[in-house]
């Protein structure tokens, strides 16, 4: 089996210090969280940024400052900015970090409910616009699929050569209003993508670690982090993203799956 790529989604746009005081906001906090995740075994940092008061932003200058600081602390890590941003942001706002020419970025493949009254909007035209922008800049998209219809959208755009092969998917299971997290759903998603694709599994909330265990067992890759889950185990808040990554490493060790270093992850994902 290929080595395991661990992505740390260290900050997200929605979680707050009120929920877990260790959620990072400042550049210092974000880069420290990235460093702890990297030292624990993460080869990709999925990056959202905040202003110091916690407000999510896609401001290119804030991204630039965070990326510079993360790169100082984790010189070879793959930094994957979000183009999802936060609910309600315009496409123009969301696209800003692409102008920093990262190796990868997220490409959200459809619209879904996002808890309460929130709707995460990604129309077909938005997806095409974002995909073309990444193609023009040579940025590899991570295809964020919160539901099966989003996988089908990615496959349709791949047939039209708007999304290039080999594709890399991130299946996110457990967002309220999108596909729920269980083994059957996970396998349904995995079985629907071309054989030459790679995939990461993200289990939201309490689903994080058993979804990770299935991903490790079947040859997928894993994303963990405060963006998706704030707890190390039931009722115990995580002290850092590093702790969440360490737990994945422990599970992988038990199952005999080695952990990819960033350059090994680059090879697996075709970034080199
Ligand atoms: N914050 C969510 C609305 C991404 O990073 O591309 C969307 C999100 C997906 O986090
Ligand atoms: Zn994200």
Image (spheres, grey):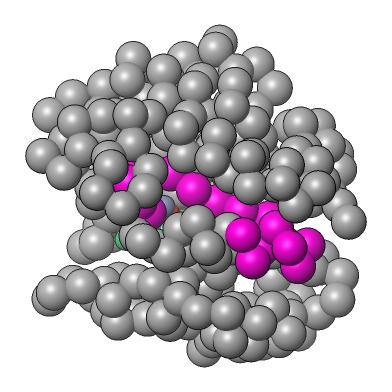
Left or right for 2, reference 131: right
Image: 269 above or below 52 = below
Q: Is residue 133 visible?
A: no
Task: Based on the picture, tell me whether residue 225 belongs to the magenta stretch.
Answer: yes
Find residue 103 and report its horizontal and vertical position in percent. 67, 40
Q: Check the picture and name the quadrant holding the N terminus.
A: bottom right
View extreme (top): residue: 72
Out of 135 and 156, give the one closest to the viewer: 156
Q: Residue at x 76, y 31 (%)?
A: 261
Left of 11 or right of it: where is 251?
Answer: right
Residue 26 location (% of width, % of height)? 26, 22
Q: Is any atom of residue 39 visible in this view?
A: yes
The stretch in magenta equals: 213-231
245 lies above or below 31: below
Q: In this view, does 271 lie above or below 126?
A: above
Q: Position of residue 61 (x, y in %)?
A: 36, 26
User: Is 242 left or right of 134, judged from the image as shown?
Assistant: left
- Which corner quadrant holds the C terminus? top right
Which residue is more in the foreground, 177 or 180? 180
Residue at horizontal 52 percent and vertical 63 percent from the top: 210
Residue at point 32% right, 46% down? 231
Tell me the quadrant of ligand 1. Answer: bottom left
On whether residue 23 falls in the magenta region, the answer is no
Q: In this view, does 20 lie to the left or right of 40?
A: left
Callout count = 0
Q: Which residue is drawn at 52% across and 89% down?
A: 149
């Amino acid at each position: 089996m290929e080595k395991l790529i661990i992505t740390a989604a260290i900050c997200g746009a929605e979680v707050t210090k009120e929920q877990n005081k260790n959620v990072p906001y400042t550049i210092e906090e974000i880069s420290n969280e990235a460093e702890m995740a990297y030292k624990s075994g993460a080869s990709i940092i999925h990056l959202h940024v905040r202003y110091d008061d916690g407000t999510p932003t896609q401001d290119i200058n804030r991204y630039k400052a965070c990326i510079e600081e993360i790169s100082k602390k984790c010189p070879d890590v793959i930094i994957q900015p979000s183009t999802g941003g936060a609910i309600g942001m315009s496409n123009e706002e969301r696209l800003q970090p692409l102008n920093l020419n990262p190796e990868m970025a997220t490409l959200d493949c459809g619209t879904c409910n996002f808890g309460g009254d929130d709707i995460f909007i990604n129309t077909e035209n938005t997806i095409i616009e974002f995909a073309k922008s990444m193609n023009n800049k040579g940025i590899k998209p991570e295809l964020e699929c919160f539901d099966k219809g989003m996988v089908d959208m990615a496959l349709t755009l791949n047939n039209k050569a708007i999304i290039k092969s080999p594709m890399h998917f991130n299946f996110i299971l457990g967002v309220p209003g999108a596909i729920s997290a269980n083994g059957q759903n996970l396998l349904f998603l995995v079985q629907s993508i071309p054989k030459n694709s790679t995939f990461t599994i993200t289990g939201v909330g309490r689903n994080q670690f058993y979804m990770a265990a299935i991903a490790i067992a079947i040859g997928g890759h894993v994303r963990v982090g405060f963006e998706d889950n704030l707890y190390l185990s039931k009722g115990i808040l995580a002290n850092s993203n590093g702790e969440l990554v360490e737990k994945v490493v422990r599970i992988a060790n038990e199952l005999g799956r080695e952990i990819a270093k960033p350059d090994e992850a680059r090879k697996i994902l075709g970034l080199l």
